[in-house]
Image (tube, rainbow, N blue to C red):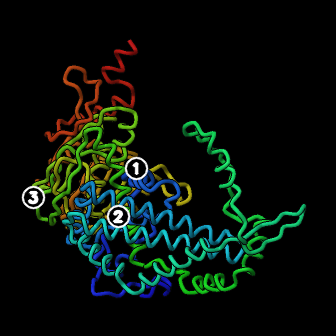
Amino acid sequence: MTASSGGSSHESAAVFVSLLFENAVAANDCRDDVPEGFSDLNLDQVVAAIVGEQDQYGLTPLFYTPAPNVDTVSKRHAVFRDLENDAIRRAAQAFTDGVGRVHECRAHIDKAHHRHEKIRWLVDSAARYCAVVTDFASALTDARLESAGFVDLSSWLGAYVASDDFRTLAETTEARLADVDSIRYDVLIRGPRIEVSRFGDEPDYGEVIAATFERFRHGDAKERHQTFPESVVLNTVETRVLEQVTQLFPEIFERFETFYQTHADYIDDVVARIDRELQFCLHYRRYIASLEKAGLAFCYPDIVGPDEAIIAQQTFDLALAKQLVAHDEPVVTNDFELTPPERIILVSGPNQGGKTTFARMFGQLHWLARLGCPVPGGSARLMFWSGLFAHFERAEDIRNLRGKLEDDLVRVHAILERVDRESIVIMNEIFSSTTTDDARYLGERILRSLIEAGAAGVCVTFIDDLATLDEAIVSMASTVDADDPAIRTFQIQRKAPDGRAYARSLAEKHRLTREALEARL
């Protein structure tokens, strides 16, 4: 590219595409629509907290777009690991902060009204851009890079900074800044009239006054600063002064005009992509840093195929953990394991015991694993899925004219039509609006369909005897304190069904549990 060619890709011996993707097409083809089941898993809350209210860097689509293959996931793991190096992380942060200031500077171009005011903002922003890119290239050259992504990026940046196009931009920008510094003029104010003329040989009265009073100096005087509000847009008087100055120095302002026409779009496409992708990684790292500080573990999961074991230890719901840590409350971690032929975890137990949180956690882990991000937990082996489906209970929607049971069946049917052995399915408390016998019958049919398709996942239900249907189903249950059954531990443990989950749910619904009766008595 040339530095003035509107941001097209830089052509050099070094080839670099992306820190996160394998090719430019994939890097530029992130999805904008919210993935199915995203909000059910509370991933929308996680992403909103990471990117901020405005999402000024456009990071949300990156969180919507899973990595296309295991190699890309591994590539991202390596990039995240490099960012654990303080020197690399500081360099990346300085680069993204600097590019942010470049964009702030460029934003004033659109706000400015005068042509030459726009040009000055362009020159300033180009100077910042050249400095930021040069500093980042130098920092990466000195850093101990391990990932292929950063190694390739460092090579590309070195070639880009050394290219004729970039050097022309940097030298021309420096020359225009020198032109700005060379402009000196007098302003003569006569009542309501202002006259502008070339600067003569008038003395600097500030220096004269300072020299006169130097003999009275006794040590350094205390500095006093007064802050005055500044506007980034020229007012009427300033605009008239600028117009007269342009007439005094026509050659300089002609060079400014040439600079504007030649270098208006100086930001390289690859540099812009690097900035966005580093923002993605750095924002995620900042999000999990407070959780790590609270003692929670994150790991880089092994990504496995559908016929291998799925395991996680000391894992937790990312959205809930963020809330609990913010209020200095403890976070309960859980483990799970599915060893072939096991494919589905059936979770039962008392209400408010963490069953839904466990289901969400399972889905979150697999989504974050496909993004190539560190995941909650001390260690993990997670499946590379082709489809992730979630079915959570919803209130009736009068717009579709369906009852709750019919709506559940329609939604479940849509999932079952698409699942295969590379699918992850999360189902939470389905068919709670019907009778026990109907719920058991429907639950059995659904579970058998999932087993037949070979899908993996979690099913939360009050009918715990469904766990005995097939060897592919693993029974886990939320537990209570051994000394006080009214206290939930929020631990989900692997245990055989005891047949009491539904009875417990009925007792809680009608306030007939032991603790409820004791309280009433």
Q: Residue 202 or 137: which is nearer the viewer?
A: 202
The quadrant of the image that shows the N terminus is bottom left
Q: List x then y, in percent, for residue 121.
A: 60, 71
* Residue beneath the point at 33% across and 71% down: 137
First in residue order: circle 1 vs circle 3: 3
Can I make out residue 339 in this image? Answer: yes
Q: Height in image: 424 above or below 247?
A: above
Residue 341's tag is 3
Element marked by disc 1: loop
Q: Which residue type carries mark 1?
A: Glu
Q: Residue 305 or 282: which is nearer the viewer?
A: 282
Q: For the residues marked 3 and 2, what is the alpha-carbon distance in whole angstroms?
A: 24 Å
The reply to whether dot 3 and dot 2 touch (C-beta < 8 Å) is: no
In the displayed orientation, state which residue is furthest to the front. Answer: 215
In the displayed structure image, the side of residue 320 where residue 452 appears, left or right: left
Q: Residue 369 or 406: which is nearer the viewer?
A: 369
Residue 413's tag is 2
In the displayed structure image, the side of residue 421 where residue 409 appears, left or right: right
* Residue beneath the point at 28% across and 60% down: 88
Quadrant assignment, res 47: bottom left
In the displayed orientation, state which residue is furthest to the right. Answer: 191
Q: Which residue type carries mark 2?
A: His
Q: Height in image: 103 above or below 485?
A: below
Q: Which residue type carries mark 3?
A: Pro
The quadrant of the image that shows the C terminus is top left
Q: How crowded is mark 3: few (under 14 residues within 10 Å), some or many (20 or more)?
A: some
Q: How crowded is mark 2: few (under 14 residues within 10 Å), some or many (20 or more)?
A: few
First in residue order: circle 3 vs circle 2: 3
Q: Mark 1 points at which residue?
A: 393
Q: For the residues marked 1 and 3, what is the alpha-carbon distance in whole angstroms?
A: 28 Å
Q: Which of marks 3 and 2 is in front?
A: 3
Q: List x then y, in percent, for residue 212.
A: 67, 48
